[in-house]
Image (cartoon, coloured by chain):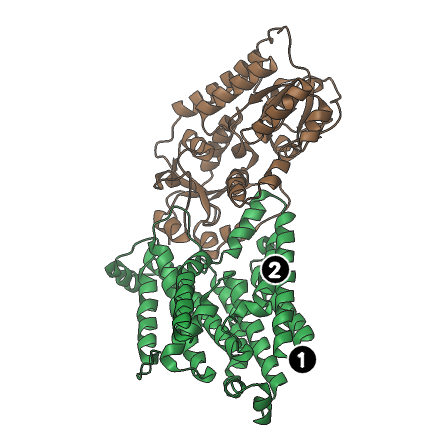
Amino acid sequence: MTTPRKNELSLKAASVCRRLACLPLMCLLLPACAGPATGTEGLPSDGASSGALPAPVAVRKPTRIMSMMLCNDVLLLMMVPRDRIASITYLAHDAVEALLPGADTGVAVNHGTAEEILLQKPDLILAGTDSAPMARKLAKAVGARVVEVGAANSFADIRRVVRQVGMAVGEPGQAHALLAEMDRKLAWLASHQPARPLRVVAWSGSQAVPGKGTLTNEIIAASGADNIAARLPDSRYGSFGLEELLAARPDAILQGETRWSGPSLQDAQSMHPLIERYWRGRRIGYPDAAYACGLPQSADAAIALRNLYRELPVGRPRW
Amino acid sequence: MVRLRQDPMPLMLALLLATAGASLVIGKVWLPPVMLFDGLAAPKPNLAWVIVTELRIPRTVLALMVGATLGLGGAVLQGLLRNPLAEPGLLGVSGGAALGAVIAIYFGLAARFALATPLLGIAGALVAGALTFLFGRSGTLTLILAGSAVSGLAAAGLALALNFAPSPYAAYEITTWLLGSVAEKEWRQIALCTPFVLAGWLCLAATPHGLDALTLGEAQAESLGVNLNRLRVLALAGVAFSVGAATAMAGAIGFVGLVAPHLVRPFVGYRPSRILLPSAVFGALLLLVTDIAIRVIPTSTELKLGVLTSLIGTPFFFWLVLRLRRMSP
């Protein structure tokens, strides 16, 4: 059951949902509940943090950090020992399993409610754009600092966000090390460009296809391929029907794989017999989690894509 | 009252034929007619051939089938219930079909098995139709009320599915599906629904005589030998099969069933039996034209069929209201 870019789409879904006036629902989808974190092991390393500079000992490093956005959750787990984390969002588990297996063991979760902020009494709240207003209102009551972290849709954004979170949690050295590793990988990719860039698209049924300005587009570009949806006229997520897909005839179709257990209608659409017939062996699965959030791991996602291109049949799809 | 002496059917059929032709040529990807004909003659498969046979013909067939079903269903129900506001969704059948299909999406059955959506949609329509009949068989008014109750139940079920959607993504999908579309369906999905649609049409085709008698009133119709219960069963079963299968395929498409009978009535007269066929043809024409408009209107995100039919249908309805107001004393 593959669903391309489900998480990225779910971000769009979320915005659609908001427009549909399910704002209260979305608020619930934000973070956290209860209980101090336990465990004092060092932060798990996915290899990306090797060579980390010893973190400068800040005078007052926050010790009860609450994250209210999925992407912040992952960054936090990479930079800070678990005993300094008050909670991460309940949405984080799948992404953490995909990117940093086991890193969230024993870490409390939140559901983004006001009550949880009051109960958990964080000293630092890492909020997303959606959750920031509510967090600010309550921060005074618990004496917490609120840092609003925007979404990262490009490698430049990732650098900005990682530095911002690193500073906020008092671990700028960790942030520096993570970014150095990411930039090393990106430099390797740039210096080993394929002779002929493949033409690909992240397509999963004819609804939203990530074009210009999306993280998926950045990862595809870094992998050395050409995202044909980037030429869509005006929007980050345009629709790209089967007719257009046939006419554009990409070399490969990227379809995200999610750990989310419920398959969806999108899966059925992306399995249209035409796709099966003409792109057999040309459908590339990728872990959704790596595309949902702009993280240092986005460079690994680009490398993984580059490796998968090698397995594609030679030439273009034939009718 | 405008009453054209000429039978509008030949004109409508000619328009329908021309529109169906245009529907094969017009698409998101512009293929010049020359290229289309070359493609059909060239060794297959090629781009033009694949697009026409696998995407545009199924889309056209489905639009015609769904449009005709809605037009016919609306005409029969307006006759049966003697109510100008009757439309195929009134008896809860569309709601039941939508709920069945949404259950298939919600539980992920649609992904494991592509035919799950239409199958469960049809099952939902039949269950809804049966419920409506069970509670409302004693008379016209109770039938409408039972239909409203079943519609309400289905709407509650849909809201529940949205409420418990496993992710915002699933909620988005369900909402989008409900907006209705005939694009990119597979031939085998259409093949699955066709027998149900045809069975429904057959049931509805047996109603005109009874509907004509019913215009005189229920008692008079019975005295003319019309079995009203049989008439209701036929209409309900016909709508459950055909509209249920159409909704299961294409999602909820509003207004066509309501507007089509009203728009043909001035041209063919007010006898219910004379409205059925023109209303079906007009419904098909209306839906196909709308579907072509969707492909032509440049939007970055696909405009959904049900959205446009409602947008186009509503002004017609206002016009209808104004006309009625002018005509009434």
Residue A105 or residue A234, whichever sits in front: A234
- Which label lies toward us, 1 or 2? 1
The colour with which the image depicts chain A is brown
Image mark 1: chain: B
Q: Position of residue B27 (x, y in %)?
A: 34, 57
Amino acid type at circle 1 is Ser
| Distance between the alpha carbons at the discs numbered 1 and 2 | 26 Å
Residue B185 or residue B302, whichever sits in front: B302
Q: Is residue B54 visible?
A: no
Quarter of the N terminus of chain B within the rendering: bottom left
Residue B182 or residue B195, whichever sits in front: B182
Image mark 2: chain: B
Most distant residue in the bottom direction:
B224
Residue A52 in which image quadrant: top right
SS for dot 1: loop
According to the picture, the residue beneath numbered tag 1 turns out to be B138
Amino acid type at circle 2 is Leu
Residue B267 in which image quadrant: bottom left
Q: Which mark is residue B99?
A: 2
SS for dot 2: helix
Q: Position of residue B16 (x, y in %)?
A: 34, 72
Q: Residue at x 31, y 75 (%)?
A: B14
Q: Residue at x 38, y 61 (%)?
A: B290
The colour with which the image depicts chain B is green
Lower sequence index among marks 1 and 2: 2
